Amino acid sequence: MTVLVTGGAGYIGSHMVHALVEAGESVVVVDNLSTGFSDFLPRSVPLVIGDAADEDLVEGLLVRHRVESIIHFAGSIVVPDSMRDPLGYYRNNTMTTRSLLNSAVKCGVNRFIFSSTAAVYGNPDQVPVPEHAATRPTSPYGSSKLMTEIMLHDAAEAHGMSYVVLRYFNVAGADPLGRAGLSTVGATHLLKIAVEAATGQRAKIDVFGTDYPTPDGSCIRDFIHVSDLAEAHRAALSYLRQGGGSTTLNCGYGRGYSVLETIEAVRRVSMRKLAVQHAPRRPGDIMAMVADTRRIRATLDWTPRHDDLDTIAAHALAWEEKLLRERGGLARQAKSA
């Protein structure tokens, strides 16, 4: 039996595929390569270049590869972009998942793991935020994911499907073995921006909002290493196979670091000066987001291995340096700030 990974050539998806292959799983990937990279996948894994919303394509894959579980990563993830193009986010996130679920139901696939986000909470009333907290997204990105969660719950109830929704907090880092990492040009992840600055590809780091009521005025985030996140998905798959009931789980470490603290971690591991420029707050940004992790630790057989900000920063930096070497050295080096 096989696991279908949608968006499996992307940042998190490729780490998931490596984790599954290492565990001896049979895997097939569907990805349109809009933000993914086929080179990051093990050569043994079939990659079908296409859209997860293409029901004919997906249903053919489900039948041909005898797929028994789906792990769904495909989607759009940038909050500011969602503010500019909400309909695009509802199409790529919500409507695509509707089509994927329809294919799963028609083909009898009854295990589904969904890549959601802490953005469904909006600005939470309490931090750390538990899974039962009110969901009040402040961006179309968060709303599109919340709509998908609701749709998944209803489809599962109607068709006997079991699912795990994993609400990611801030995913960062790269594969410790250097096989995959965040490679999208123009990515907006804070650690990605910081390591690009540390390697001379950016002249400065913009910090959006330094007047929040936090210890240093910048936003606070709960960073989780991408490899630990992949292992959480693998643990979720084992949980469902063992008959576990449908559930929603936060994916974080339960501790927060400010934007400025995160930049300082990159300074430490790179031993390079980083130019920081303060900028106004961005629409849709959330002040503080830290996971209450009690439920995931009680539900899944999952123990994080990389719960350390400097380790996460070091792995992100090593990946960025590898990318820079492979893309032709310092040819694209930014002008001095």
Image (cartoon, grey):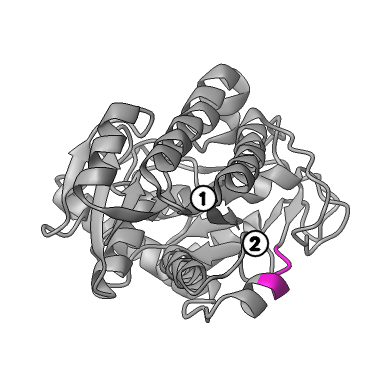
Q: Is residue 32 visible?
A: no
Taking depth in this image into account, of 145 and 324 the one nearest to the observer is: 145
SS at mark 2?
A: strand
Depth check: give the residue in front, 53 or 214: 53
Residue 262 placed where, x, y %?
Answer: 58, 61
Residue at (73, 67) in percent of width and height: 292
Q: Residues within 10 Å of mark 2 (few under 14, many from 20)?
A: many
Q: Is residue 162 left or right of residue 317?
A: right
Q: Quadrant of the N terminus?
A: bottom left
Q: Nearer the viewer, residue 103 or 177?
A: 103
* Identity of the residue drawn at 45% across and 34% down: 102
Query: Separation of disc 1 and disc 2 at Cα?
Result: 12 Å
Residue 284 place in picture, x, y as percent? 70, 33
Dividing the picture into quarters, in which one does residue 333 lie? top left
On the picture, is 258 further left or further right than 223?
right
Q: Is residue 253 magenta?
A: no
Residue 250's disc is: 2
> In the rendered structure, which disc, 1 or 2, sits on the residue that comes first in sequence?
1
Question: Which range of residues does the magenta coloring cover?
Answer: 291-295
Judge the density around disc 1: few (<14), some (14-19), many (≥20) Cα neighbours within 10 Å: many
Identify the disc placed on residue 229: none
Q: Nearer the viewer, mark 1 or mark 2?
A: 1
Q: Residue 167: which quarter of the image?
A: bottom right
Query: In the rendered structure, which amino acid carries the disc numbered 2?
Result: Asn
Residue 267 lies, with reference to residue 324, above or below; the image says: below
* Residue placed under numbered mark 1 in the picture: 114
Count of all numbered marks drawn on residues in the image: 2
Compared to residue 103, the image places residue 162 above or below, namely below
| Percent position of residue 227, x then y | 41, 68
Residue 294 is one of the magenta-drawn residues: yes
